[in-house]
Amino acid sequence: MAKGNKNKGKQKGESLADKANKHLLYEASVQCVESEIDFVDETFRKIRNRDASILREDFCGTANSSCEWVRRRPTNIAYSVDIDADVQAWGSEHHVSKLSEEQQKRVNLLTADVMNSGSTANDVVLAMNFSYWIFKSRELMIQYFRSVYNSLNEDGIFILDSFGGYEAFREMEESTKHDGFTYIWDQSSYNPITGDGLFHIHFKFKDGSKLKQAFTYDWRVWTLPEITEMLREAGFKAEVYWEGTDEDGEGNGEFEATTTGEADAGWIAYIVATR
């Protein structure tokens, strides 16, 4: 029986949390693949004066970004790399299957370690949603960055994101209301000696039910100077793209290369690394 429901005859699974799908909730609250691919397309075109065609999405999860990529142009090809076959299967059923037959042929799901995916000659490699923070040592991170470097075309680029600000090092929860549910980002623990952080995503629903620890991330919280230094050690040139603000001082979704950011409580930035 659903928690808190004392009515006899009620079947288990009637709460909104029981009915919810965590991947759909994640995509509704965390991802905006249209904006993400806009940034990839516009940035590559600005830097290289041509359109990118071959994209590799590392830690791809449901391959949502890869599907958006192949929808953009008939010349676009995506390689979607993740070690979790189950989440890729979900993405195949719910995203890839909704593409046209021709578009589906241009999405290649690779169940593999990102260190050795076999995908080479890429125009763009993406590592989004801070997924690469799973590498907690400099040695492993630089190894990953070098593997990306070697997988790119001569004019290929590597795009990552990062978050920070003084609240990134606090143990805290942040709630954001969405249509039909509340997204909860839980910074469960942080070790200032090692930089290790444990994070969870929970979802709460209008009937009071919760989907606790729908996602858990055991990461090292890397800073922008550390990330850009490791990228340069791996052979890249690296620039940080900082988000601009609107007239109310809120983020406007426009990211520009800069060497100066603001000491905000919390921020998200892109890092663009070129060969």
Image: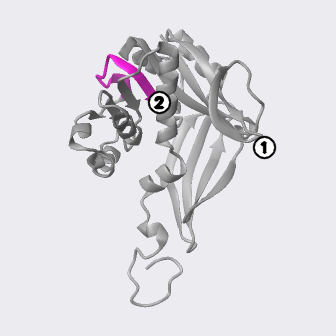
Q: Quadrant of residue 57?
A: top left
Q: In which quarter of the image is the N terminus?
A: bottom left
Q: Where is residue 64 in the image (x, y as percent from the top left)?
A: 39, 42
Q: Nearer the viewer, residue 18 or 220?
A: 18
Q: To which residue does mark 2 refer?
A: 127
Q: In this view, does 245 lie above or below 115?
A: below
Viewer-nearest residue: 153 or 37: 37
Q: Nearer the viewer, mark 2 or mark 1?
A: 1
Residue 61: where, in percent of width, then height? 39, 42
For the residue marked with disc 1, what is the amino acid? Asp
Is-magenta flag for residue 120? yes
- Residue 248: mark in rendering: 1
Q: Is residue 162 something that shows in the picture?
A: yes
Give the magenta range: 114-128
Question: For this view, does 57 lie left or right of residue 35?
Answer: left
The percent coordinates of residue 92 (x first, y second) are 29, 46
Q: In this view, does 98 lie to the left or right of 157?
A: left
Q: Where is residue 73 in the image (x, y as percent from the top left)?
A: 34, 31
Amino acid type at image mark 2:
Ala
Residue 131 shows in the view = no
Q: Is residue 148 above or below residue 172?
A: above
Q: Residue 63: within the magenta?
A: no
In the drawing, does residue 101 fall left or right of residue 111? left
Q: Which residue is drawn at 25% across and 40% down?
A: 104
Q: Which residue is drawn at 50% across and 87% down?
A: 6
Tell me what residue is drawn at x 54 percent, y 60 percent.
203
